[in-house]
């Protein structure tokens, strides 16, 4: 049996598909409301990605389709298992369903990897990883990666939490600390309970606390992830300390891209009025041709391309739906389009003529290579 398993590992291909069927092989209860789900590909694959990137989950819950993005918590240095660490959001739909329904043996389909926020595209000697709450997941992916490959890399790891019971990866952080001389973590509780006997640092982020914990701040490259308010506070502190913001990189922890989508809709309305009018009297509709599918569709000027494809049951894959992840890219063969946000479109994809369907509208008849 062992020989057979080793043979599978040796012949495993790299993760390069839009859709990958996976099976849950373990569930770890990290805190009272956070679980880590470990997955293996049904067909032996190596999960190659850049620490900081995320995957997309397309789920059907009670007859409704839901798209969510979750940062990969594991490291590509251990490519046979993929981990996502998910907090059960009060009043949410997807995260409570995952907590209650995904167990060992559960199967689902993932898409990815995606996202520009990562540590491989940014050279660094000394790093500062700053996170709050669930934003710790990409920081752990980076920390695991560096301690596996560069055990002498100078890493400061700061994580803000509400209380002791909210510390995610607490035992693993302590293990990394004990086994790596240059990995220096600091957990800061903002509201520790009276019964928790917390002896560590307390309080919210501020300039005094930051420079006290990181006296060589100016020498470091910073990676940050957490709620929007937290990251704005971090940036305000750094700017107040004269930090070179070219060395600051962040990623909003916004599952589903809800904030991004709301911002996009507001901006869309402004652009419709002041810059790129996409409403035209003639023709009233455009023709969308899907070359490989041999399908032609009628599209109104204000229709979102991804929604048009979904309504025609053309599944190309999507995740954030806000132009951030790049999962819904397709090749445009001809025609004019207007894309509101395309942060998730790499230079390589642009050279190939790719567009992101989740933030694109038609300005003429268009043909796609799908």
Image (spheres, rainbow, N blue to C red):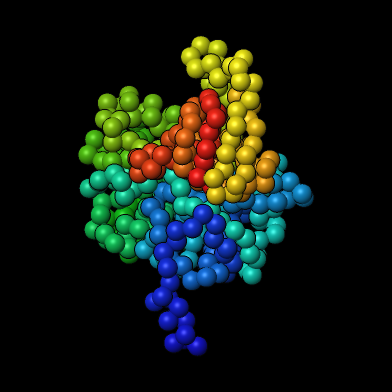
- In the foreground, 353 or 97: 353
Q: Is residue 7 above or below residue 187?
A: below
Q: Is residue 237 above or below residue 60?
A: above
- In this orientation, does residue 196 appear? no
Where does residue 60 sit, x and y in percent of width and height?
70, 51
- In the foreground, 359 or 308: 308
- Furthest residue toward right: 62
Q: How many labels sit on residues? A: 0
**Residue plotted at (40% across, 59% down):** 48
Where does residue 6 sit, x and y in percent of width and height?
42, 81
- Furthest residue toward top: 274
Q: Is residue 188 above or below residue 208?
A: below
Task: Give the left or right position of residue 367, taking residue 124 as reference.
Answer: right
- In the foreground, 276 or 80: 276
**Residue plotted at (39% across, 52% down):** 51
**Residue plotted at (43% across, 72% down):** 12
- In the foreground, 107 or 286: 286
Where does residue 100 sit, x and y in percent of width and height?
70, 57
Q: Is residue 347 above or below residue 25?
A: above
Task: Give the left or right position of residue 145, taking residue 218 as reference.
Answer: right
Where does residue 351 sit, x and y in percent of width and height?
35, 40
**Residue plotted at (48% across, 31% down):** 335
Q: Which image quadrant for residue 312?
A: top right
- In this orientation, does residue 154 appear? yes
């Amino acid at each position: 049996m062992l020989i057979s398993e080793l043979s599978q590992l040796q012949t495993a291909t790299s993760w390069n598909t839009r859709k990958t069927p996976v099976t849950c092989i373990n569930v770890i209860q990290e805190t009272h409301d956070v679980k880590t789900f470990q997955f293996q590909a049904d067909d032996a694959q190596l999960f190659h990605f850049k620490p900081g990137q995320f995957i997309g989950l397309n789920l059907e819950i009670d007859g409704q389709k839901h798209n969510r993005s979750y940062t990969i918590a594991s490291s590509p240095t251990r490519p046979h298992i993929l981990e996502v660490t998910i907090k059960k959001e009060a009043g949410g739909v997807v995260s409570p369903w995952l907590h209650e329904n995904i167990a060992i043996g559960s199967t689902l389909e993932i898409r990815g990897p995606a996202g520009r926020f990562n540590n491989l595209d940014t050279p660094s000697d000394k790093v500062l990883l700053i996170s709050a709450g669930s934003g710790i997941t990409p920081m752990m992916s980076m920390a695991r990666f560096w301690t596996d490959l560069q055990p002498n890399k100078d890493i400061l790891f700061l994580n803000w939490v509400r209380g002791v019971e909210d510390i995610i990866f607490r035992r693993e952080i302590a293990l990394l600390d004990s086994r790596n001389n240059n990995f220096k973590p600091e957990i800061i509780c903002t509201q520790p309970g009276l019964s928790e006997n917390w002896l560590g640092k307390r309080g919210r982020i501020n300039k005094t606390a930051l420079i006290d914990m990181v006296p060589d701040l100016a020498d470091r490259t910073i990676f940050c992830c957490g709620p929007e308010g937290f990251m704005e506070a971090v940036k305000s502190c750094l700017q107040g300390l004269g930090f070179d913001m070219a060395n600051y990189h962040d990623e909003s922890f916004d599952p589903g891209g809800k904030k991004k989508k709301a911002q996009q809709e507001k901006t869309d309305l402004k652009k419709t009025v002041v810059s790129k009018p996409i409403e035209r009297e003639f023709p009233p509709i455009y023709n969308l041709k899907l070359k490989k599918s041999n399908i032609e569709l009628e599209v109104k000027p204000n229709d979102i391309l991804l929604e048009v494809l979904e309504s025609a049951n053309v599944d190309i894959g999507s995740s954030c739906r806000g132009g951030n992840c790049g999962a819904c890219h397709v090749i445009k063969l001809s025609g004019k389009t207007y894309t509101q946000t395309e942060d998730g479109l790499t230079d390589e994809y642009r050279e190939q003529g790719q567009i992101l369907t989740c933030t694109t509208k038609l300005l003429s008849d268009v043909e796609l290579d799908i």
